């Protein structure tokens, strides 16, 4: 175990002072960190950032709009926390596409995101290429696609609909965000392992694996806003968020090893549990390793890393997207009316449950536009990080050194007037409609919700169709009334969730598409 040096002790006392004066006794001004953040001696811009963490997202919009889309954040001296923050589409296209080979996640990213191991979230270079190639083959497999859509249909019919009927009958106030998190956790877990967790039920049980994902997310955010030595010290001592991170990793190890062992036995015995042979775990275990030299499906750690990564991505991004979408509908009743009319014109009454037939969903152009607009303003993954391998100069003129921290604030990018126009802050699905009335695609380096370049999300189409299916099922059969008076604000974190959830009351319609 490494000992603390004098410099680290000095920083520790600086942060005790910072905590006392700026956290326990906040500054009188409400604008401690504004469009011209103060760069303090020794502590850099971190004091203002910590004080204003509760409104991190709005601040990022203000700062980047005033900084011409790219801003240099200065952390405490010698802390390694300097970050070049950019939402410039030209910079992002350069980093993610045209000069992709020079920009990686890097060892610092992998250390911060250690819970994801060597999975596709963390990996770089040849390991990433192996994982990407294998994942591309698996996601393109028709059996897997059919399995995921049938899983969604089953969870809608057997879990979400009965639960909504119960809430409607009992006139219960329910947290819609929690419902969507549980629905997506169950759906993703089946798609990954072929097994049920049943977190979405009347009892709303605590699920250890889901809680572990939440604890990891909180710890990773903490690692972004605290100097490395400080969270390393907490990890060494075993306290705070670092203790929860360690416990979460132990949960991942134990749960994933159990399911991997059971799946190997199932495959060995030739047992077929429904269509479980088409789940991701089965498909990865059966990989032809002669085509992927760096992948080892016989290793429990390999299977754990991919499982944790896909579970986090599958649950959180879609649940967040659905939650913000229904809130946006409640704030924009005219948009809801147009969607209902489009559904009435183009869909048979039972399309929502028949999600395997995407031909009907593809007719819902305005729904696709409204969903894209919601994802623009409230991207499920609000930021991304990269580091250069070699010195480079971005199109904006900013010079970056090897291993420098570069961050894309995707939340702020969707609200930049210089990118989306003067009405950037408005919820306006019409901006996605082409002159011919079809869906107007935007460049991925401008609409970064599904990443861009070689790392574009492989599950993009699956996720969009899943969200459409859930939305259609709900809108055909229920009215969602958002409870007045609740505070709606994003929670700082790896995923753009609502800090206080989304409390709603559900009413069952007398007939579809009332």
Image (cartoon, rainbow, N blue to C red):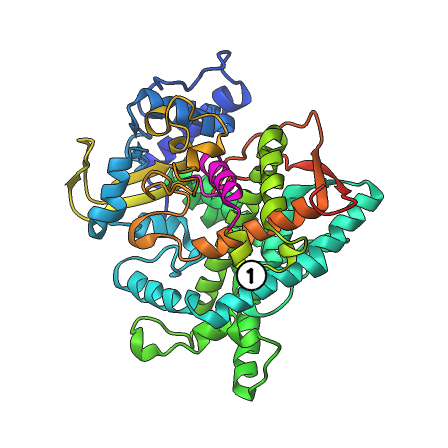
| Residue 265 relative to residue 432: left or right | right
Magenta range is 363-382
Q: Is residue 150 above or below residue 35?
A: below
Q: Residue furthest bottom?
A: 269
Task: Check the image and report above or below for 342 versus 261.
Answer: above
Q: Point out residue 268 in the picture as x, y percentages from the top left corner.
A: 52, 86
Q: Main secondary structure of the magenta part?
A: helix
Vertical side of 176 occupied by 414: above or below: above
In the figure, is residue 128 to the left or right of 51?
left
Q: Is residue 486 left or right of residue 419?
A: right
Q: Viewer-proximal residue, 39 or 358?
A: 358
Can residue 39 be seen by looking at this rendering? Answer: no
- Secondary structure at badge 1 equals loop
Q: Is residue 108 above or below residue 400?
A: below
Q: Position of residue 16 (x, y in %)?
A: 46, 28
The answer to if 381 sits in the magenta stretch is yes
Report the front residue among 217 and 11.
Answer: 217
Count of numbered marks: 1
Query: Looking at the rendering, which quadrant does residue 226 occupy?
Result: top left
Badge 1: residue crowd in 10 Å (few <14, some 14–19, many ≥20): some
Q: Which residue is mark 1?
A: 357
Which residue is located at x 53 percent, y 42 percent? 367
Residue 424 on image: x %, y %: 42, 26
Is residue 304 a member of the stretch shown in magenta?
no
Residue ID at (23%, 50%)? 100
Quadrant containing the C terminus is top right
Along the line of sight, the residue nearer the viewer: 354 or 380: 354
Identity of the residue drawn at 61% across and 69% down? 195
Most extreme residue toward the right is: 170
């Amino acid at each position: 175990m490494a000992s603390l040096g004098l410099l680290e002790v000095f920083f520790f006392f600086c942060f005790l002072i910072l905590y006392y004066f700026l956290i326990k006794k906040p500054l009188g001004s409400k604008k401690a960190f504004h469009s011209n953040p103060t760069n303090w001696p020794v502590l850099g811009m971190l004091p203002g950032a910590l004080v204003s963490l509760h409104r991190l997202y709005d601040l990022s919009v203000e700062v980047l709009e005033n900084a011409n889309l790219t801003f240099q954040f200065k952390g405490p001296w010698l802390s390694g926390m300097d970050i070049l923050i950019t939402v410039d589409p030209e910079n992002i296209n350069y980093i993610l596409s045209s000069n992709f080979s020079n920009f990686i996640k890097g060892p610092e990213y992998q250390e911060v995101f250690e819970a994801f191991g060597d999975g596709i979230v963390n990996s770089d270079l040849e390991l990433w290429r192996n994982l990407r190639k294998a994942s591309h083959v698996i996601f393109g497999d028709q059996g897997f696609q059919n399995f995921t859509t049938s899983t969604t249909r089953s969870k809608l019919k057997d879990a979400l609909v009965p639960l909504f009927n119960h809430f409607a009958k009992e006139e219960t106030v329910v947290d819609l965000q929690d419902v969507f998190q549980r629905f997506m956790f169950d759906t993703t877990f089946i798609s990954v392992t072929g097994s049920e967790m049943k977190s979405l039920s009347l009892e709303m049980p605590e699920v250890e694996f889901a809680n572990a994902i939440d604890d990891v997310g909180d710890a990773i955010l903490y690692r972004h806003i605290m100097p490395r030595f400080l969270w390393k010290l907490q990890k060494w001592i075993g306290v705070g968020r670092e203790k929860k991170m360690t416990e979460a990793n132990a949960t991942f190890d134990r749960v994933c090893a159990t399911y991997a062992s059971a799946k190997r036995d199932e495959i060995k015995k030739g047992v077929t549990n429904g269509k479980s042979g088409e789940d991701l775990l089965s498909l990865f275990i059966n990989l032809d390793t002669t085509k992927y030299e760096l992948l080892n499906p016989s290793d429990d750690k390999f299977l754990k890393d991919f499982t944790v990564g896909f579970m986090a991505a599958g649950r959180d991004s879609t649940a967040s997207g659905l939650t913000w979408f229904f809130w946006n509908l409640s704030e924009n009743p005219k948009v809801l009316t147009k969607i209902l009319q489009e559904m009435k014109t183009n869909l048979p009454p039972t399309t929502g449950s028949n999600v395997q037939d995407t031909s009907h969903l593809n007719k819902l152009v305005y729904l696709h536009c409204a969903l894209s607009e919601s994802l623009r303003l409230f991207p499920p993954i609000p930021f991304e990080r990269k580091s250069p391998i070699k010195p480079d100069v971005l199109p904006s003129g900013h010079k970056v050194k090897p291993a420098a921290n570069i961050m894309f604030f995707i939340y702020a990018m969707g609200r930049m007037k210089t990118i989306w126009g003067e009405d950037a802050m408005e919820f306006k699905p019409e901006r996605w409609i082409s002159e011919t009335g079809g869906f107007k695609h935007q460049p991925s380096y401008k609409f970064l919700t599904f990443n861009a370049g070689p790392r574009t999300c492989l599950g993009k189409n699956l996720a969009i169709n899943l969200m459409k299916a859930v939305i259609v099922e709900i809108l055909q059969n229920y009215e969602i009334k958002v409870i007045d008076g609740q505070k709606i604000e994003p929670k700082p974190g790896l995923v753009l969730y609502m800090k206080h959830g989304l409390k709603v009351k559900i009413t069952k319609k007398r007939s579809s598409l009332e």
